[in-house]
Image (cartoon, rainbow, N blue to C red):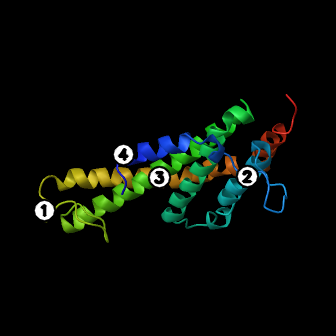
Amino acid sequence: MKSTAVLKKDFSEFLDFPETWTLPTSTEKHDSLPHRVKDVLPSILYARLADISAYSEWLEGPYVSIERLHRLRIAAKGLRYTLEFFESVLGKEVEGLIKDFKVLQDHLGDLHDAAVATEMLGAYLKTGAWELPGSEKVSNEKKQVTENPEGIEAYLAYREAELLTLLDTFPEAWEKVQTGEFRKEIESEIRSLYEVH
């Protein structure tokens, strides 16, 4: 692993040669390559949107996997960060899209936190150790549940209720980014790249 000093030196050397910063504009056969933001960004946005849309078949029905929801959160983060990075190019209208993805991402983050907490609390009540099945122990000592099992049970019940509420309200947060209107907004942002300002 490189040290910070080596990384700084390498990056400094990279900055000394601006010609290496740009993507090639043509192939060796002189075929044109997309290199402008307006030519590259649409495919990036559609790919990020496709990453998210691909989850729709896994998120309908009576049982939705917490792990899939966590993976969806990561995919949503990819689109949100792409929109944020190119916000100055896309314009102020993209702020609403970013906000919708932040709401979805926060909802999924809270859901994942509640799932992990309930699993940890349940494991602690069973084993007396703060660990999840298949993970490293937080402490080498195995503790007995003598401190306040009623308090831990009450907190577990609270987190389980929170988890159920978040699962029940997830379809509403998901629906906002699955509507045809949302896709139209993305397409409108893409069209705006080609407008002459």
Residue that badge 2 annotates: 24
* Residue 150 horizontal side relative to residue 155, left or right: left
Q: State which mark lies toward you, 4 or 1.
A: 4
**Callout 2 secondary element:** loop
Q: Residue at x 84, y 55 (%)?
A: 32
Q: Nearer the viewer, residue 158 or 130?
A: 130
* Mark with earlier residue (1, 2): 2
Q: Nearer the viewer, mark 2 or mark 3?
A: 2
Labels 1 and 3 touching (C-beta < 8 A)? no
Residue neighbourhood size for the residue with mark 1, other residues' Cα within 10 Å, grouped as few (<14), some (14–19), many (≥20): few
Mark 1 vs 3, N-terminal side: 3
Count the marks: how many?
Answer: 4
Q: Is residue 11 above or below residue 75?
A: above
Q: Give the residue number, with chain letter if any, for mark 3.
A: 111
Q: Amino acid at mark 1?
A: Lys
**Residue holding disc 1:** 143
**For the residue carrying disc 3, how many other residues have a C-alpha within 10 Å: few (<14), some (14-19), or many (20+)?**
many
Residue tagged by mark 4?
4
